[in-house]
Image (cartoon, rainbow, N blue to C red):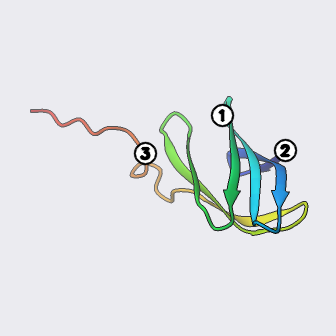
Amino acid sequence: MTRVADIQLQLRRTDPKKAKYDLLIQVDDSRLEKKDRTANEPVQFLVGRDKLRYEVVVNYVDKDRIRGYLSTPKDKVLAAERPQFRPE
């Protein structure tokens, strides 16, 4: 497992010919397994009590390595995925 920001990532399998990969994401106390994802396909998931939306995008798939980036929200208050209740 490789720690990146608030999450941990583990590469399970790669297929460079088809540009596909399997990835295990550990967030908080849960594990998410993403199978048969392709390069440049965004993988979104929610993190923390505030349900912040994180996104992993893999740009290159090599034999035993993937390269890409993790996108996190800049403003955590505005990015929370909670329903907004309006008093009537």
Judging by the rendered image, the residue that carries numbered circle 3 is 80
Residue in the picture at 79% in, 48% down = 3
Q: Secondary structure at mark 3?
A: loop
Q: Nearer the viewer, residue 80 or 17?
A: 17
Residue flagged by tag 3: what amino acid is it? Ala
Residue in the picture at 83% in, 66% down = 16
Residue flagged by tag 1: what amino acid is it? Asp
Contact, mark 2 vs mark 3 (Cβ under 8 Å):
no
Q: Which mark is residue 1?
A: 2
Q: Nearer the viewer, residue 34 or 84?
A: 34
Q: Residue 87: x and y, percent?
A: 14, 33
Distance from the alpha carbon under mark 2 to that under mark 1: 14 Å
- State which quarter of the image contains the C terminus: top left
Q: Which mark is residue 28?
A: 1
Task: Give left or right: position of 13 versus 20.
Answer: right
Residue flagged by tag 2: what amino acid is it? Met
Disc 1 packing (10 Å; few <14; some 14–19; many ≥20): few
Across the whole image, how many numbered discs are drawn on residues? Answer: 3
Task: Give left or right: position of 57 versus 87.
Answer: right
Q: Mark 2 or 1 closer to N-term? A: 2
